[in-house]
Amino acid sequence: MASQQIDRLLSIMARLRDPATGCEWDVAQTFQSIAPYTIEEAYEVADAIAREDLADLRGELGDLLLQVVFHARMAEEQGAFDFDAVAKSISDKMEARHPHIFGDDESETPQPRRWEDIKAAERDAQGAASALDGVAHALPALMRAEKLQKRAARSGFDWPDKDGPAEKLVEEIGELADADGPDHITEEAGDLLFAAVNLVRAYGVDAEAALRSANQKFERRFRAMESLAADQDADFSSLDLQAQETLWQEVKRSER
C-alpha cells in the first residue's frame, strides 16, 4: 500500500539523517545544499515526460519525492514542521482552490481564472504588497519573465494587441545594436529577451515550452548535419560556413 511505502521512505530518511548512526553525507546536508538537487530532479521528471519514458518517469518521480522527504525531515529536526504537515498543507490548499469540487461554489468562472483569483486572494490575505509578490526568484529566467508579465497583465498593465509587443521587440533590437560597453550591452540584451517573451505571450504561447522545442529541433538538426558530413567522409567542424549551411538546408528539406 502507498502509506506503507511512504512510511518506509520516511523511516529510511530518518535513519540516514541520524547524527550518530546515519550517513555522513546525508547528515551534513542543509536546505541550501539540497535545493540544487531538488531543482535538478524536477527537470529530470520533465525530461522523462518529454521522452514519453514511463519507466524512467517512475524512477524520476521517486527521486523527486525523496527531495520532499529530505526537506521535510530537516524541518522536523528543527521543530518547524514534518512530512505530515507538508501533505496536510497541500491537501488543504487543493480543496480551497477547488471550491466547485470540494465546496458549494457554483460559479461558472473558467477554472484557470478561478484558480488565479483564489491565489490572488491568498496572497492578499498573506499581506502581499505588490501584484508581483510570490513569483519565485529561483525560477528559470525565461519562465519568471512570463510569470511577471502575466501578473502585471492581471493589473491591466499589458498591450491591447500584438502590435505593441512586436514594435517593442524591434525597438529593443535597435537599442542592443547601439549599446556601448559590456554592462550596457548586457542590460539591453536582457531587455530584448524580456520583450521577446512578451511578444510570444501575446500569441498565447508558453515561452519556456516553445524555447525547449526549439532547442530540441536545433539539436536534432545539428546532429543530422554531423551525420551527413560523416557519410561524406568529412569532418563537420572543418567545413566552411557555406558547406555547413548547405548541410543545414539539406536536413531541413529532409524533415519536410
Image (tube, rainbow, N blue to C red):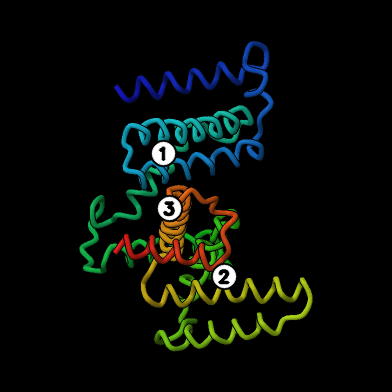
Residue at the limit of the structure toward the top, as seen here: 21
Residue 217 visible (yes or no): yes
Numbered disc in front, either 2 or 3: 3
Secondary structure beneath dot 3 equals helix
List the residue tagged with mark 1: 88
For residue 76, above or below residue 179: above
List the residue tagged with mark 2: 130
Gap in Å between the C-alphas at discs 2 and 3?
54 Å
For residue 53, above or below residue 123: above
> Is 190 left, or right, of 98 in this rendering?
right
Q: Quadrant of the N terminus?
A: top left
Q: Quadrant of residue 115?
A: bottom left
Q: Amino acid at mark 1?
A: Lys
Gap in Å between the C-alphas at discs 2 and 1?
28 Å
Q: Residues within 10 Å of mark 1 (few under 14, many from 20)?
A: few
Which residue lies at the image location 29% right of the left edge and 64% below the top edge? 256
Which residue lies at the image location 31% right of the left edge and 43% below the top edge? 52
State the image coordinates of residue 59 (x, y, percent, origin top left): 40, 30
Compare marks 3 and 1 and give the one earlier in the sequence. Answer: 1
State the image coordinates of residue 250 (x, y, percent, origin top left): 38, 63
Q: Residues within 10 Å of mark 3 (few under 14, many from 20)?
A: some
Q: Return the residue nearer the eye: 56 or 12.
A: 56
Q: Amino acid at mark 2?
A: Ser
List the residue tagged with mark 3: 228
